[in-house]
Image: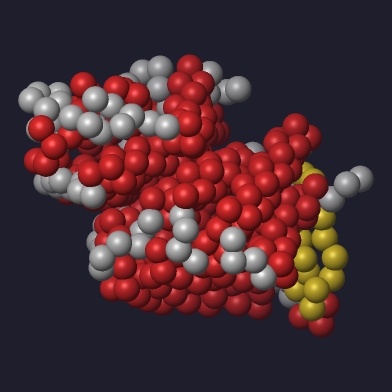
Amino acid sequence: MVPIVTLTLFAPLAGAVLVLALGTRSARRAHAIGIVTTALTLLGALSMWWRGIGAGGFSQVEQFAWIPSIGVAYRVGVDGISLPLVLLTALLFFLAAVYSARIEARAPAYVILTLLLETASIGTFTALDGLLFYVFFEISLVSMYFMIAGWGHEDRQRAALMFFLYTLLGSLPLLLAILGFYLGSTPHTFDMRAWIAHPPLSGTAATLALIAMLITFAVKIPIFPVHTWLPAAHVEAPTAGSVILAGVMLKFGTYGLVRFALQMTPAAFRSAGVVILILGVVSALYGAFAALAQTDLKRLVAYTSVNHMGYVVVGVAVAALASDPAVRAMALDGAVLQMVSHGLVTGALFLLVGMLQDRTHTREMADFGGLLQVIPGLGWAFVLVAFASLGLPGLAHFPAEFQIFLATLQVAPAAVVVVLGIAVVAALYLRAIGRTFFGALPARWTAMPDLDVREWLAVAPLLVLTIVVGVAPCA
């Protein structure tokens, strides 16, 4: 059988090596290789989706020995949690490559870093070996650091350094937890499937491992109060960087919360479930109110990510606390669907804000007004994804959040106060739409061009999928 997972995983790396080997200085050629490579990777992800998954456990597993003396192996595969995230990753990288085709400054280096980041991202979601997961998890930090520092905006150096230090230091506790799982397993192994089937730690050891993992994944998600790196990184990153950061890299945290914390320390997670639930509720409400206070469109979208990822944490915590398997499945399905819908919706929002910034060189809502008169395509696209972000029925976030809230109501009714975040997000997006796209049009924007073909190609698939996921979430 064709090793489609491995081919999909390393196709971007092969593209990066090709750009490096050709030694080209042509931006056009480098971007062409980047677009073709990410398109092939997307085809690989679609093939994985077509093959599907089994009723339980992992499917499409490929493995061989890597460091046999300590039980480390190259093990990759997918299940119902990781496969949608692989497909989302491949789609967002392809669209980001299309959108970035006009970058001229050091284009070959930009394409190489982007492709390296794609391999690291897909590797994080497909790794079934604890050490392999950690390797991919860490490589992604390096690529994103150089993307922000090299192609970001005015204060990019400080934002890149803050991002790198936060996430690097935050990931060290995970390494300790992985070592604990290895030493606690009999025989010693880094096989994540064995850790999930037979959790190797219990009692105090499991609680300490859970605390270590929560520190790592709380920073990565991020949740309040370890979220402070996120707004700066989003605001200063190039547009494609913001799309990847929000659409893919924030999912490393929530994916890890499910794959490691929930599945490998289930008893300890259940014991700490109420604390994790409170953290999720506080983070979701904090993100909504913080977004309400923003006047910068990109910073506003960044804080709504804290809000939406808080809902994911609530869903995972409720799944851990639920005694009814049906309620547990509902909460977990809602959390996974929320990860995917957030990637689609927030990815589109960052693209559209970036397109607006390209035209005006500002993101302040006070500088706009009446833009729908001159850029109806961009304006109505923003309205669509803004309504999706605030949870309107028929659009992507609604089925995910509805499942999370319904499960929460059955397991921890008091925590359903988190639903107030939707009202706040609705208010802030209605205000943003009104200030930016309605009212009197300033004279300096009367000649602003609407979306061109390249921009439509980058954002249209996300708009379509925002509707498809909202109407047919089980498709």
| Residue most extreme to the bottom | 69
**Snapshot quadrant of residue 432:** top left
Residue at coordinates 32% horizontally, 56% vertically from top-left?
Answer: 234
Question: Is residue 416 visible to us here?
Answer: yes
**Residue 131, image x, y percentages:** 65, 71
**Residue 319, image x, y percentages:** 47, 41
In the foreground, 401 or 454: 454
Residue at coordinates 51% horizontally, 48% vertically from top-left?
Answer: 101
In the foreground, 308 or 346: 346
In the image, residue 151 above or below residue 79: below
In the image, residue 196 above or below residue 176: above
In the image, residue 204 above or below residue 123: below
Rendered-image quadrant of the C terminus: top right
**Snapshot quadrant of residue 64:** bottom right
Question: Is residue 133 visible to us here?
Answer: no
Please name the colour scheme applied to the rendered image. secondary structure
**Residue 256, image x, y percentages:** 52, 57
In the foreground, 310 or 298: 298
In the foreground, 432 or 252: 432
**Snapshot quadrant of residue 74:** bottom right
Q: Is residue 13 left or right of residue 321?
A: right
Question: How many numbered marks, from 0 up?
Answer: 0
**Residue 207, image x, y percentages:** 46, 67
Q: Is residue 67 left or right of residue 435?
A: right
Residue at coordinates 48% horizontally, 17% vertically from top-left?
Answer: 471
Residue at coordinates 40% horizontally, 63% vertically from top-left?
Answer: 151
Rendered-image quadrant of the N terminus: top right
